[in-house]
Image (cartoon, rainbow, N blue to C red):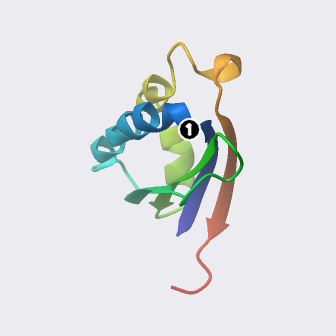
Amino acid sequence: MIVVQNRLIAPVEMRERLEQGFKHASNMEGLAGFVSFKFLRAEGEIEPGKALYIAQTTWEDRASFEAWRSSDSFSRAHSGPESGGNSPLKAQVEVFEIAIG
């Protein structure tokens, strides 16, 4: 089993829009290998005007995560006017194997 964390640093004025945007994760239920999703917000600001979020998914295996990542639903969820190089978000993806749990 793996846990994938996407660390997102966002301008604080984007908080509401970002949180609304991640409500789509509820439609991940039923994806092959998908176990769970959590969207975490750090308390306070990590630096003036910046908020830290963690989008955390748990998968049965790496192959299931990669299949979702190359799917049309992933592409649709991550497209829009502020995607890619136009995004004010800073993102870093981390993949962990569950060692104990």
Q: Residues within 10 Å of mark 1 (few under 14, many from 20)?
A: some
Residue situated in front as seen by the camera: 38 or 67: 38
Q: Is residue 33 visible?
A: yes
Please determine whether, in this image, residue 7 is positioned above or below residue 19: below
The residue shown at (59%, 21%) is 83
Q: Is residue 70 visible?
A: no
Residue 89 locus on image (x, y percent): 64, 33
* Extreme residue in the top direction: 81
The residue shown at (53%, 61%) is 43
Number of numbered markers: 1
Residue situated in front as seen by the camera: 75 or 93: 93
Residue 55 locus on image (x, y percent): 51, 51
The residue shown at (58%, 57%) is 4
* Extreme residue in the bottom direction: 100
Please determine whether, in this image, residue 97 is positioned above or below residue 9: below
Residue 30 locus on image (x, y percent): 28, 49
> Is disc 1 placed on a helix, strand or loop?
helix
Q: Is residue 48 left or right of residue 66?
A: right
Write down the quadrant of residue 27 in the picture: top left
Kind of residue at disc 1: Val
The residue shown at (53%, 62%) is 61
Residue position for label 1: 12
